[in-house]
Image (cartoon, rainbow, N blue to C red):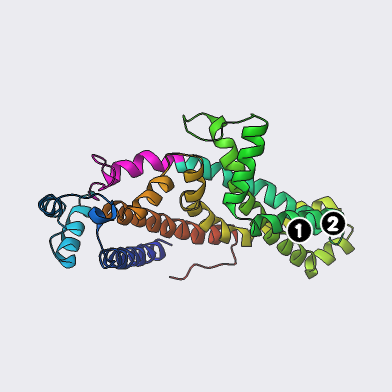
Amino acid sequence: MAKYILKRLLYMVITLFIITTITFYLMHNIQGDPLTAAGKTLPAQTLENYRIKYGLDKSTTEQYKMFLENAMHGDLGSSFKFAGRSVSGTIKETAPISGKVGGQAMIVGIVIGLTFGIVAALTRNRWPDSVIKIIAIIGVTVPVFVLGSLLQYWMGVKKGWFPTSGWTGEFKYSVIPTIALCFGSIATYSRYMRSNVLEVLNQDYILTAQAKGVSKFNIITKHVLRNAMLPIVTIVGPQVAAIFTGSFIIETMFSIPGLGYYFVNSVTSRDYPFIIGTTIFYAALFLVVQLLVDIVYGLVDPRIKLAE
């Protein structure tokens, strides 16, 4: 196990380096720079002074070497757009906000989605199954910003139950964004769980248990759910990473000062340090989660052997 983890960690470092390098060079080879993207009409000398200050007058390779040297010491630079804000500090400050909203949406999506999937499988081709299919289709096909707008109007403007925008950290400000975000997770988990439960129900050992007179409740709880849950572990990994990456639009719509909100603004303004910093954060998070999923998968199912 230890040898496998060390090997995966080496692959993660190499992968992270490749992602960082590609992102850095792609950004710096797009026409224009953060100063021109800001749309400000500054004197030529002032623009030149800013370019010297931020190192934009140097070649891309020189800038990349400077970035790597600073990153090795934990310094991802300072934002061009948000003056006085370091990239590392902003990530530490805003990631928990994105994590709260996205985490709530993921938990709600998993609980409701798995429940819907089990119910749909056990009531196959009956009305509960049809209703859950419709809900899943809505969750997959309707864009999150459409759901968010509808919920803003109905739950916020019309009913006045919850705030429609802003953020103070109180739970009520996260309710509508959480509901808007969880629809996709509900659709995903319900469809996967339905398929997995139906597949397990057709296995020989389930038929044998039924022939022996084992109660339906015991068959579902002791055999079906345990085996049907295994494939779900695989999709939980990307969902954990999506806690931070999947809320860009919602955070912008609801004026939530999360990491996604700043990332969208940094892209539109070509804020190089913030773009590369958040890319590194997202990539590292995804790689770590994938490693944890592999380890958990091996622990949950003894039949799966981790390659050494």
**Does the segment drawn in magenta span residue 27?**
no
- In-image side of 267 versus 297 (left or right): left
Which residue bears the numbered disc 1?
133
What stretch of residues is rendered in magenta? Answer: 76-97
Which label sits in the foreground, 1 or 2?
1
- Three-letter amino acid code at disc 1? Lys
Element assignment for label 1 = helix
Task: Classify residue 39 as left or right of residue 245.
Answer: left
Quarter that holds the C terminus:
bottom left
Residue 295 in view in this figure: yes
Task: Looking at the image, tell me whether mark 1 or mark 2 is earlier in sequence order.
Answer: 2
Q: Residue at x 65, y 59 (%)?
A: 141
Left or right position of 99 against 59: right
- Nearer-the-camera pick, 245 or 263: 263
Q: Residue at x 40, y 55 (%)?
A: 282
In the rendered image, residue 271, in percent from the top left (x then y), is placed at 29, 53
Tag 1: Cα neighbours inside 10 Å, few (<14), some, or many (≥20)? some
Examine the rendered structure and indicate whether residue 101 appears above or below residue 171.
below
Measured from the top left, where is residue 129 in percent x and y? 81, 57
Count neighbours of disc 2 (C-alpha within 10 A) and say few if under 14, some if 14 to 19, many if 20 or more.
few
Of the numbered discs in the image, which one, if any, rests on residue 123? Answer: 2
At which x and y percent is residue 218?
80, 52
Instruction: Give the SS element for disc 2.
Output: loop
* Towards the viewer: 211 or 9: 9
User: Decide: marks 1, 2 in contact (CB < 8 A)?
Assistant: no
